[in-house]
Image (cartoon, helix red, strand yellow):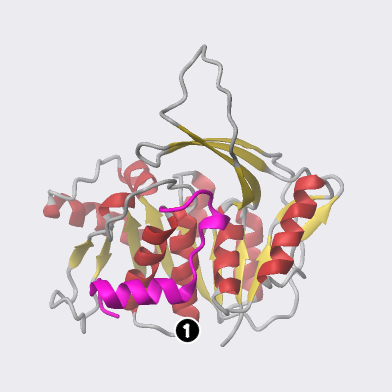
Amino acid sequence: MKPVLMIGLSTYDITVPMDGPLVENQKYHLRVSTRGGGGPAFNAAYLCAKWGVPAYLRTRIGCDEFGEAMRTLMKRAGIFEEEVLQRREFHTPYSYIFTNNFNGNRTVMNFRDDPETRHLPFGDHDIGVILTDGHEKTMSLDAFEKYPRALRVLDAGNFRDYTLEVAREVDYLVSSQVFAEGYTGRKIDVGDPKGCAEIFESVEAINGKTAVITLGGEGLLYRAPENSLSGHGGEVCHMPAYPAEAVDTTGAGDIFHGAFVCGLAEGMEFEQILCLAQMAASISVRYEGSQTSVPERSAVEKELKSTGFGYL
């Protein structure tokens, strides 16, 4: 199995559970918090390494307390660190995340610098899959050029010009609902199959290859392959999310993307990859934190088999 390369944001997360949403002009006495790694690229790399897929991570961290904590987590997971950019002039991004105990929703306050993007060479690795979160356009395009045979995946979270530029160059455009609605100017309603298909086709046309639109607790949209086990080959389909009682939704999308890359690296069938990723995200929201909620591969497969969810 060839290694995977993740490019983008790593953060140190401090997650605080609360009995309800934040309210202005209130004083809170908080006793519990969860600390761990976060950020789209880091969480995806952490999952892949934990699941036995060799993973490199190209990310920026500083020589500070949070940066050292992130390096410790990388070593613990077995992430290859040759591509990590740790510099004294960088400040490690960090986040305070306040989660609502009643519904698992969260409020994120992220602190990070935006250092000038430079062309920094990559190592001579035989990379099989590249996942970029779109935060590092120059690095992403450089990686595509350095590893021309690698499959290219974009975690398209927010709709921005530079994310759209990267989206045009990938093989798999995994778009959030926010990105899809920002790009098309239309709201997604899973109760409107025709409208969903029109929005999906607009997003799909960006890269002209494979697209997925993730919808959080409402599942995802995808085009079923011709040999689909669903019986809807070639059609735009809605795959519901596996139900979960959410404790904290932080990092669920990152974990979805990590599992998606893992499935690609292992050569799984497309719909099987989607089921694997959906279940990994479903299990993750039952626990606090992002990196701290990455499930074991065995737990994901066991629940897939026991529930009959999807095509595994």
Picture quadrant where residue 8 is located = bottom right
Is the residue marked by circle 1 packed among few (<14), some (14-19), or many (20+) residues within 10 Å? few
x%, y% of residue 138?
A: 65, 56
Name the foreground residue: 119 vs 223: 223
Residue at numbered disc 1? 266
Name the foreground residue: 152 vs 58: 58
Task: Mark yes or no: residue 119 visible.
Answer: no
Q: Residue at x 12, y 49 (%)?
A: 192
Q: Residue at x 63, y 72 (%)?
A: 145
The residues colored magenta run 286-312
- Under circle 1, the secondary element is loop
x%, y% of residue 244?
A: 31, 54
Q: Is residue 311 magenta?
A: yes
Picture quadrant where residue 2 is located = bottom right
Task: Mark yes or no: residue 112 visible.
Answer: yes
Quarter of the image where the C terminus is located? bottom left
Q: Is residue 141 magenta?
A: no
Specify the farthest residue to the right: 88
Picture quadrant where residue 139 is located = bottom right
Quarter of the image where the N terminus is located? bottom right
Residue 204 in the image: above or below residue 123? above
x%, y% of residue 300?
A: 40, 71
x%, y% of residue 310?
A: 25, 73
Specify the farthest residue to the front: 31
Residue 126 in the image: above or below residue 144? below
